[in-house]
Every structure is written in structure tokens, then in C-alpha cells.
Amino acid sequence: MNLAQLAEGINTVWVLLAAAMVFFMEAGFAFLEAGFVRSKNSLNIVMKVFSDATFGTLAYWVLGFGIMFGLDKAGVIGTSGFALQGPFEYLGLHIPVYAYWFFQAAFAMAAASIVSGAVAERMKFKPYLVFTVIMTAVIYPVSGHWIWGAGGWLNKLGMLDFAGSAQVHAVGGFAALAAVLVLGPRLGRYNEDGSINVMPAHNLQLAFLGTFILWFGWFGFNPGSSLSGLDLNIARIALNTNLAAAAGGAMATVFTSLRYGKADPSMAMNGALAGLVGITGGCAYVAPSSAVLIGLVSGVLVVLAVSLLDRLHVDDPVGAIAVHGANGIWGIVAVGLFAEQGGLFYGGGAHLLGVEVLGVLSAAAWSFGATFVVFQVLKHTVGIRVSKREELEGMDLAEHGMPAYTGTATPALPGLGAEGAHPPFHPHEVPAS
């Protein structure tokens, strides 16, 4: 074995390990989202995340990877490489294309799972499967081709998005925003006078576990995007990733303490995740001190964004839009400001900042528009929302026929019939939680 073969072997093992860590982030999404929703919907949300990994993987293999990384002369959409049918020499990889596909597929799953949390507690399961397939096969790959694909138009302009603040998080976050706007809020979330009813998370400890899993997986997400275990910059990338997460979580804790009088655990979690989203685009390009500053801003931004969305009656049970959408944009703007080569604050002028803003707005607009159309079509054909009775009963029983926890089904009582039955539902009876 010569040195070139040894290097390729090391890089392949590194990318496969990083890909496995990113794939494991699906467990983080599952626990985080299950913990944030009510117990009667917790199994349903885990099923949706699981479907991102199953249906999403197959869709990305058949179409998504080719659209994202296939050959293209116009810079808009790839037209080769479907079902991993090569050749792929033009990608200039120093690892097998199979390893590269695994890594990229895990990213596509993550983008889809961002949407699952935002539509929790009221979206039908089967239409969600249709969306997941479209998201991983078309919506996510098209913008991915622009930013990361060979010949993509934003790639040619010099856009920097190292691990996906725009491509994964802004794309996922603005898809979630479009989905929520079409779907509407949960029953009882907002009153006619505009006031907001709290719908408490059923298990914040479970959500904290999900947060830690996501945080762990991000050390594959960001350093793994180097595609090289021999690139010593992966140490700085990991450091920047950790610093931004810590700063985001700390700032959200302090900010909610000052604003509301108590430290909000849900905002602390989302603050750390917001810091991770914010640093993802520039983790390879900024200094550690800049990573801390990016995280601090993320920790404030996520709290303000959640508050704004609630005032606008945009119901997002897990805060996905604020975490991924708002901070995905901030993370790319931060590249234009803090990149040590080309950043505005480092003497690079406004050129890179302009390209970054154009890139993230283009990706977000594409994702929002495409998702809005898909959800409108689904709404007016198969329907996207469960009935009022099913929503009150809970998605677990209505969609899957079983509760997440044993002993939670309504017992058999006189006049109710079989175990798990419910009294007649009247449309005007909408509970607060």
C-alpha cells in the first residue's frame, strides 16, 4: 500500500464515521421532538422522523443525489448520477462515491426532519410521507446543486457554506415555515382575542437527551464536511462548533432569565441548537472568538424569533423555524462578516457578504415556494390535517392505533364501549391543551 492509498483509506473511514454520526442525529431529532410535544402525539412524531430515514434515504438514492451532484451545464439542476450510476470522476473525490453518498444522504434526512417538528400534533402521516419523498428527492437537492454541486450557479459565484447553514438549515427552516402556514395552528393554541394558550411539553428530559445527541452528531456534521481525516483544520472546526453551541445555550439561558424572570429550559436547548446552526456555514472559515460571538447572537435571535412567530400565530411546537430558519440565515450572513479571508470585518469588503446574502435568500425562497406548492396540492387532494376528533384524541391512537405509553388509553366505562373509546366530540369543544 502506497501513501496515496493510505490517505484515501483514512479519509474514507473518517467520512463514514462522520456520516454515521450525522445519521445518528435522527435519534436526536426523534427524542427532541417527542419530548417537546404532548404524550398523545409522541409516537407519531418519532414515526415521522423514522420515515425521514427510511423513505428519505431511498428517495435521495433514486433521484436526489443525481439532481444535487449530477452533471449540469446551466448551473441549475443535475441530470446524471441517478441511483448512483456513474461516472463521478468530475466530482474530484478522494474517497469512494459510496461514502460520499452516505454522508450527503444523512444531511438530506436532517433537512426533512426539521419540518417534522414544525408540523407536529396535527398533520396526517401519509401526506407527510409524500412530502418527505419530495423534499429529499427534489426540493433539498435542487438548492444543494446551486450551492455545492459541480457547476452550481451559487458555487460559481463563490458562495461559502461549509456544512450547510443555508443548504440544510435555512432550506429546512423555510420549508417548515411554508408547511405551517398552509397547515394552520393546533386546536386551542390561540384564542379569538389573540392570546396564546400554553401546550406544555410532556417530557423535557427526553428533549434534553435529544439535544445532547444532536450536539454530539454535529461533530460529524461540521468536521466531517472536510471529507478528510488528514485535514488538521478539523480540530478548529470542532472547537468552533462546540464554542458556538455553548455560547448559544448560555445566552438563551441568561436572556430568558432577564426577560421572563426565569431561565427557560426549552429556550436553553434551542439556544444551543441555534448556536450550532449559526456556526455550521462558517465553522471552517472563522476564528474561535468569532464562533463565540456567532453563538451569542444565535442565542438571542432564537428567543426573539420564537416570540415573533407566536405573536403572528405561526404555530411551531418545537421551535424549528426559529432555530433553523432564522439562524440558518444568520449563519450565512456571519460568514460574510467574519470569514478570515473575504469577510467584511477582516478587510474583505462587501463582495462575499453580498454573495452570501444572495445565496441564502435564494435557497430559502426556493424551499419556501416549493414546499408551499406541495402542501397546497396535498391539502386540496388527499388532505393534510387530521380531523378535530383525531387531533383531540391524539395522533398516536388516530394514526397508529396505539399509545406511546402503556396505561394511558381511556379505560372501558359504562356508556363508552370498548377500551380506548371516547365520548362524542362536539366541534365547539376545543380544549386549551
Image (tube, rainbow, N blue to C red):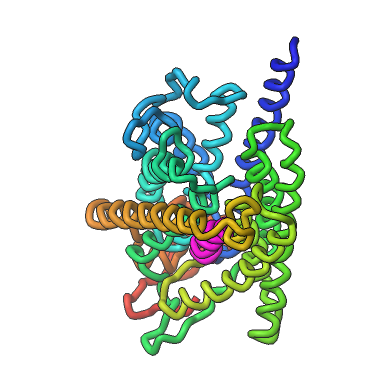
Residue 423 visible at all: yes
In the displayed structure image, the side of residue 118 where residue 296 appears, left or right: right
Using the image as rendered, state which of residue 115 and residue 201 is in the foreground: 115
Q: Residue at x 52, y 36 (%)?
A: 105
Left or right, residue 324 beside residue 291 = left
The residue sitting at 51% across, 54% down in the picture is: 352
* Residue 268 appears left or right of 143: right
Q: Which residue ends up furthest to the bottom in the rendered image?
A: 193
Query: Number of numbered discs present?
Result: 0
Q: Residue furthest left?
A: 380
Please give the name of the residue rendered at 27% of the width and 57% of the height, measured from the top-left corner: 376
Q: Is residue 30 above or below residue 74?
A: below
Position of residue 111 measured from the top left corner of the image (x, y, whole percent)? 49, 49
What are the residue bounds of the magenta stretch?
A: 318-336
The residue at the point 43 percent across, 59 percent down is 174
Instruction: From this view, report whether residue 20 is shown above or below residue 196.
Output: above
Report the front residue among 252 and 354. 354
Furthest-top residue in view? Answer: 1
Q: Is residue 194 magenta?
A: no
In the foreground, 46 or 89: 89
Question: Residue 403 appears at what percent x and percent y?
Answer: 54, 56
Residue 236 location (% of width, % of height): 74, 47
Nearer to the camera, 417 or 201: 201
Main SS class of the magenta portion in the image: helix
Q: Identify whether 403 is placed above or below 6.
A: below
Residue 132 coordinates in the image, percent (x, y):
41, 45
In the displayed structure image, the side of residue 18 where residue 390 appears, left or right: left
Residue 322 forms part of the magenta stretch: yes
